[in-house]
Image: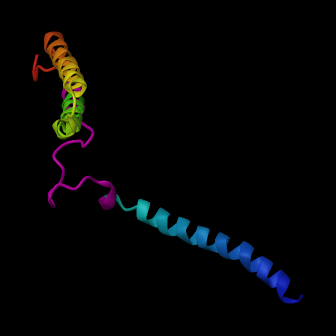
């Protein structure tokens, strides 16, 4: 009965103390400018690390990833082809991929530079 208030107070104060301790350690680490600067092999950085990113390059990367995933998913299909329906399904999927590729080519999404 006597230990109950002590246990309750410990359950209340220990997390608060740990939280305050971690906050002060984190605040001390955040004040270090050397850790906040970008790392370039020990040299001072030449320019800002926040350069604008090309949206054309991003779009081309997304298209590459989508086509790459589609091809990886199509590779095991010949192992499971047991009927003519599977061949027709594979031809349909491949034609959709080819039509999508032609559309992106005509749209100009695959051009590296303007």
Q: Above or below — where is 107 with respect to 2?
A: above
Residue 68 percent across, percent down from the top left: 19, 35
Q: Residue furthest right?
A: 1
Residue plotted at (18% across, 50% down): 45
Q: Is 71 in front, or is 52?
A: 71
Residue 36 colored in magenta in the image:
yes
Q: Quadrant location of residue 110?
A: top left
Screen quadrant of the N terminus: bottom right
Give the total number of marks visible in the rendering.
0
Q: Above or below — where is 86 with respect to 30?
A: above
Screen quadrant of the C terminus: top left
Q: Main secondary structure of the magenta part?
A: loop
Q: Quadrant location of residue 113?
A: top left
The region drawn magenta spans: 34-61
Residue 53 percent across, percent down from the top left: 24, 32
Residue plotted at (42% across, 60% down): 31
Residue plotted at (23% across, 23% down): 93
Q: Residue furthest top?
A: 106
Residue 97 colored in magenta in the image:
no
Q: Is residue 53 visible?
A: no
Q: Residue furthest bottom?
A: 2
Residue 87 percent across, percent down from the top left: 19, 25
Q: Is residue 95 visible?
A: yes
Residue 103 percent across, percent down from the top left: 19, 12
Q: Residue furthest front?
A: 83
Q: Is 84 in front, or is 6?
A: 84
């Amino acid at each position: 009965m006597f230990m109950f208030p002590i246990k309750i107070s410990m359950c209340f104060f220990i997390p608060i103390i740990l939280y305050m301790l971690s906050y002060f350690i984190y605040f001390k680490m955040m004040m270090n400018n050397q850790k906040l600067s970008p790392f370039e092999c020990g040299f001072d950085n030449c320019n800002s690390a926040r350069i604008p990113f090309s949206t054309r390059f991003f779009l081309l990367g997304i298209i590459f990833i989508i086509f790459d995933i589609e091809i990886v998913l199509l590779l095991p299909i010949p192992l499971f082809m047991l009927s003519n329906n599977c061949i027709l399904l594979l031809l349909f999927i491949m034609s959709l991929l080819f039509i999508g590729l032609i559309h992106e080519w005509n749209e100009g999404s695959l051009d590296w530079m303007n």
